[in-house]
Amino acid sequence: MRKLAFGYSTRCNIRCEHCVAKGDIPDSRKMNHDKAKEIIGEMARANVGGISFSAGEPFLYINEISELVKLCGQLGIYTRIVTNSFWAKTAAASDRLVSELKENGLCQLRLSYSRWHQKNINRNNVLNAARSCRKIGLNYYISFVTDFSREDDQYEEFLRNHCLTFFPEPLIYAGRAESFKRRSILTDYQANCCDMNPYLTPDLDMYACCDAGSHFSETNFFYLGKLNGSTVEQLFTKSETDRLHNLIRTMGITNIASFAGMKAREIITYSKCELCRKLFNSPETLKMLRAEVSQLTAWSR
Ligand code: SF4
Ligand code: SF4
């Protein structure tokens, strides 16, 4: 199923130290609302089955996002909103907004949570939002961003103590987290396959990967093009027919790294997105992989 992270606006009301957003200047780009509706119509025609409203903080434009959610529902598109829960200060305020979204057809809320988010947002907001979802019958989960350090134990304990549904998400060392100290990684030799859902920016640029993919500045490896000049169908097809993109989905980044000459001992010291960047944000490595993609495809057990 085609899915997409819809960046309606990059504006956020807080400034987390770990955000994948780049730079010190607040980024407040926003899509034109009518254009967004037109794009969603085109997405439905291109068989996009799921849209996640993410990027900045979608609840800053909740009336406009609600309208887009409703439109998606009418067109049969599954919807999710990713939020920092700033709006859930009280149980009553939270219940009201969650009910409205449920009535408009929202399918899921994803609540961001971490020791960095919670410097700006009281963790009880996240609790209120999750409880409202349970009460009103809206599917939710908490995305617990962590660098797996002991400091995060108390944050995880809070989620467990309140019996909340959560999934740990590894911190991505991109954007503002670029300069963070890396942990030493001791894992199995994992495949590191990646679904790669595309990301649409408020300026209508589309990238094949919704997380760190827009930061590959040396090669622009994940950049698919602008929706002004191309159709949704053309941009999705571009990634779906790119042999290296498909190998990331099926073979995984670890095997590609091994093929490219990296030692196994070195490979296991990288997190997934860092390994991805090491390979695909290097013009020389990318050139070699493109040239040898047929041999790489045959590099199977
Ligand atoms: S991580 Fe999310 S909540 Fe934090 S600054 Fe970035 S967009 Fe805002
Ligand atoms: S591993 Fe690569 S494709 Fe997957 S999320 Fe990270 S940067 Fe994107």
Image (cartoon, grey):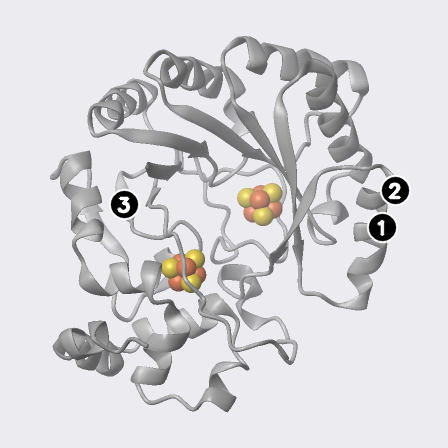
Tag shown at residue 157: 1
**Quadrant position of residue 281:** bottom left
Name the residue at 46% across, 32% down: 53
What distance separates the C-alpha of mark 2 from that of mark 3? 40 Å
Q: Is residue 81 left or right of residue 284?
A: right
Q: Secondary structure at mark 1?
A: helix
Q: Provide residue 224's location: percent of width, then percent of height.
A: 21, 51
Q: Position of residue 86 (x, y in %)?
A: 68, 31
Tags 1 and 2 in contact by the CB under 8 Å rule? yes
Q: The N terminus appears in which quarter of the rendering? A: top left
Residue drawn at (25%, 55%), measured in percent from left and top?
223
Give percent across and percent down for residue 179. Answer: 57, 72
**265 and 126: which is toward the camera:** 265
Residue underneath mark 2: 161
The answer to whether the residue bearing label 1 lies less than 8 angstroms from the nearest atom of ligand 1 is no
Q: Amino acid at mark 2?
A: Asn
Q: Determine crowd level at label 1: few under 14, some 14-19, many 20+ residues with C-alpha closer than 10 A.
A: few
Mark 2 is surrounded, within 10 Å at the Cα level, by few (under 14), some (14 to 19) or many (20 or more) other residues, namely few
Residue 169 against residue 184 in the figure, above or below: above
Residue 90 is left or right of residue 69, and the answer is: right
The answer to whether residue 13 of the structure is visible from this angle is: yes
For mark 3, what is the residue? 206
Q: Is mark 2 within 8 Å of ligand 1?
A: no
